[in-house]
Image: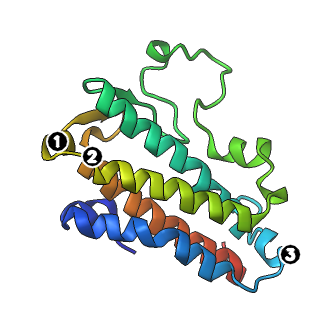
């Protein structure tokens, strides 16, 4: 599995190719699988294949929102999915608050296990195509625009694309492990 840093050393076009293949790879992996197999969590704290597909669908909305924000604002700062920011007070987070962006809460509240995985893949494909179309319209100057990731620091569009490519690899491997019954 290629890491974010390994993708960052590759041409952006390679990362975009990886991103363009993700929905098809999810569709191929789930093809012919029963709903029971798609819904089975290999371990109590692990996601099922269905939950992974729904996560990829939903996180794509966050990625494209970040990209549009990077175009509209200079150096916006973004929270990290599944982590509390280091300076909670600056984000209005007080003791007892839940994670601002919690993928496990999304899975529960959005009832990923009850979702139609075929529809989730269709939505992922559509959202990813929108993301890739937006990235395809960027000028060379816009590719250099940045944002601040609260734990990784300054990130350009190219850095985000490397992160997404690695994120896709990580979750495709997770989806395949879930289908094999491995956590």
- Check whether the beta carbons of the residues at disc 1 and disc 2 lie within 8 A of each other: yes
Q: How is the image coloured?
A: rainbow
Q: Nearer the viewer, residue 93 or 24?
A: 24
Q: CA distance from mark 1 to mark 3?
A: 45 Å
10 Å crowding of disc 1: few (<14), some (14-19), many (20+): some
| Residue plotted at (46% across, 52% down) | 130
Q: Quadrant of residue 150?
A: top left
Q: Quadrant of residue 167?
A: bottom left
Q: Quadrant of residue 143?
A: top left
Which residue is identified by label 3?
A: 36
- Residue 21: x %, y % from top left: 45, 73
Q: Nearer the viewer, residue 14 or 88?
A: 14
Q: How many marks?
A: 3
Which residue is identified by label 1?
A: 144
Of the numbered discs 2 and 3, the one sitting upstream in the chain is 3
- Residue 35: x %, y % from top left: 84, 74
Q: For mark 3, give the secondary structure.
A: helix
- Residue, far left: 141
- Residue 177: x %, y % from top left: 63, 77
Quadrant (top left, top right, bottom left, bottom right) of the N terminus: bottom left
**Vertical arrangement, residue 36 with respect to residue 71, above or below:** below
10 Å crowding of disc 2: few (<14), some (14-19), many (20+): many
Which residue is identified by label 2?
A: 157
């Amino acid at each position: 599995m290629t890491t974010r840093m390994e993708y960052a050393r590759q041409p952006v076009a390679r990362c975009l190719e990886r991103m363009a293949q993700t929905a098809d790879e999810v569709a191929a992996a789930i093809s012919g699988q029963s709903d029971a197999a798609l819904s089975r969590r290999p371990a109590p704290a692990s996601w099922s294949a269905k939950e992974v597909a729904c996560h990829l669908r939903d996180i794509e909305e966050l990625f494209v929102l970040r990209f549009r924000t990077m175009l509209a604002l200079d150096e916006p700062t973004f929270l990290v999915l599944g982590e509390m920011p280091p300076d909670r007070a600056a984000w209005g987070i007080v003791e007892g608050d839940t994670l601002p962006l919690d993928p496990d809460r999304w899975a529960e509240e959005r009832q990923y296990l009850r979702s139609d995985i075929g529809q989730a893949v269709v939505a992922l494909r559509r959202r990813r195509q929108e993301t890739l179309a937006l990235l395809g319209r960027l000028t060379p100057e816009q590719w250099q625009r940045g944002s601040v990731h609260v734990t990784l620091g300054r990130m350009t569009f190219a850095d985000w694309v490397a992160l997404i490519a690695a994120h896709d690899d990580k979750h495709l491997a997770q989806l395949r492990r879930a289908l094999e019954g491995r956590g």
